Amino acid sequence: MKEKVQAPELRFDGFTDDWEQRKFADFIDVKSGKDYKHLNSGSIPVYGTGGYMLSVDRALSDIDAIGFGRKGTNDKPYLLKTPFWTVDTFFTLFLNKILTFNFHYLFFKK
């Protein structure tokens, strides 16, 4: 049995390869935030489910990410530019370099 080729009818110049089906987990690493109360005041923003909370003296991440709450606000993601800290009720999505950061931010907004 011949395998069906997966490709769009309309192609952009320079794109000729067949499409590959991949799992979302191959491109995204989901992490939970951590408690910040042991940190001192500083210039690093802390984000929670409702957005910016306060600033501390240490960063939890030095990689840009997409953040969203565990419940209630998971349809309102945040673009998290480094450095930042996230609280334990907030998920952080780290994207593989293959993915387009802004595209997936908009994807999670939907």
Image: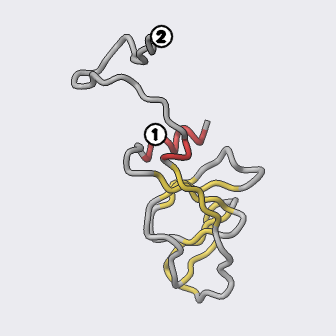
Q: Position of residue 84 (x, y in %)?
A: 51, 70
Q: In terms of secondary structure, where does tag 2 sit?
A: loop
Q: Residue at x 56, y 72 (%)?
A: 85
Label 2 amino acid?
Met
Residue most extreme to the left: 14
Q: Which mark is residue 1?
A: 2
Q: What distance separates the C-alpha of mark 1 from that of mark 2?
A: 36 Å
Where, quadrant-wise, is the C terminus in this rendering? top right
Relative to residue 93, is residue 32 depicted above or below?
A: below
Q: Earlier in the sequence, mark 1 or mark 2?
A: 2
Label 1 amino acid?
Phe
Residue most extreme to the front: 1
Q: Are marks 1 and 2 in contact (CB under 8 Å)?
A: no
Residue most extreme to the right: 72
Q: Quadrant of residue 38?
A: bottom right
Q: Position of residue 89 (x, y in %)?
A: 72, 64
Q: Which mark is residue 103?
A: 1
Q: Residue at x 64, y 54 (%)?
A: 68
Quick one: 55 or 10, which is closer to the camera?
10
Quick one: 17 or 44, which is closer to the camera?
17
Q: Which mark is residue 55?
A: none
Q: Position of residue 109 (x, y in %)?
A: 60, 41
Relative to residue 62, is residue 68 depicted above or below?
A: above
Dot 2, how many residues are within 10 Å of its Cα: few (below 14), some (14-19), or many (20+)?
few
Q: In terms of secondary structure, where does tag 1 sit?
A: helix
Q: Residue at x 68, y 84 (%)?
A: 37
Relative to residue 87, is residue 22 depicted above or below?
A: above
Dot 1, how many residues are within 10 Å of its Cα: few (below 14), some (14-19), or many (20+)?
few
Q: Position of residue 46 (x, y in %)?
A: 59, 71
Q: Left or right? Give the position of 76 relative to 57.
A: right
Q: Nearer the viewer, mark 1 or mark 2?
A: 2
